[in-house]
Image: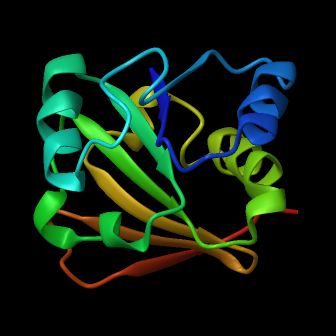
Amino acid sequence: MILLDENIPEDQRDALRKFGFKVRQIGFEVGTFGMADEEIIPLLHKLGDATLITHDRDFFEPDWIHPAYCLAFLDIPEEDLADVARRFLQHTAFNTSAKRMGKVVSVGRSGIGLLQKKRRQPVFIDWEE
């Protein structure tokens, strides 16, 4: 499941759907509007196998690494969220749910910063051409 944080604007959510992604959004289809970050983590555990796409830097947190979900912080301008989320979700290192689970990532213009349980130091992955 691709889950969008409530801070993802409606036009960006709609763009992801037009790209063919089945997304659900916190505060609309899942959970409640205004949920605190600490409330979202148990929701991810309950949903299982979910990738949270957010524009909230607080989710790039190594203590929140867990095999049941992926946290993807998009560190880019709001108007580019859908395009960069699509690019992340189609990257060969992240193009399946199984490849994303257990990771916390920071997605930016120059590439993807990756945190994993076994490696507490971030790993940087370039965008593929």
Question: Residue at horizontal 42%, vertical 36%?
Answer: 51
71 sits left or right of 113 in the view: left
Q: Nearer the viewer, residue 45 or 103?
A: 45
Answer above or below: position of 118 versus 98: below
Q: Nearer the viewer, residue 48 or 77?
A: 77
Q: Position of residue 78 (x, y in %)?
A: 74, 62
Q: Position of residue 37 (x, y in %)?
A: 24, 53
Question: Residue at horizontal 26%, vertical 85%?
Answer: 121
Answer above or below: position of 57 versus 128: below
Quadrant showing the C terminus: bottom right
Furthest residue in direction front, as rendered: 34
- Asked where in the image residue 44 lies, by quadrant, the reply is top left
Q: Position of residue 92 (x, y in %)?
A: 64, 45
Furthest residue in direction bottom, as rendered: 121
- Asked where in the image residue 112 lies, by quadrant, the reply is bottom right
Q: Nearer the viewer, residue 109 or 28?
A: 28
Question: Residue at horizontal 18%, vertical 78%?
Answer: 120
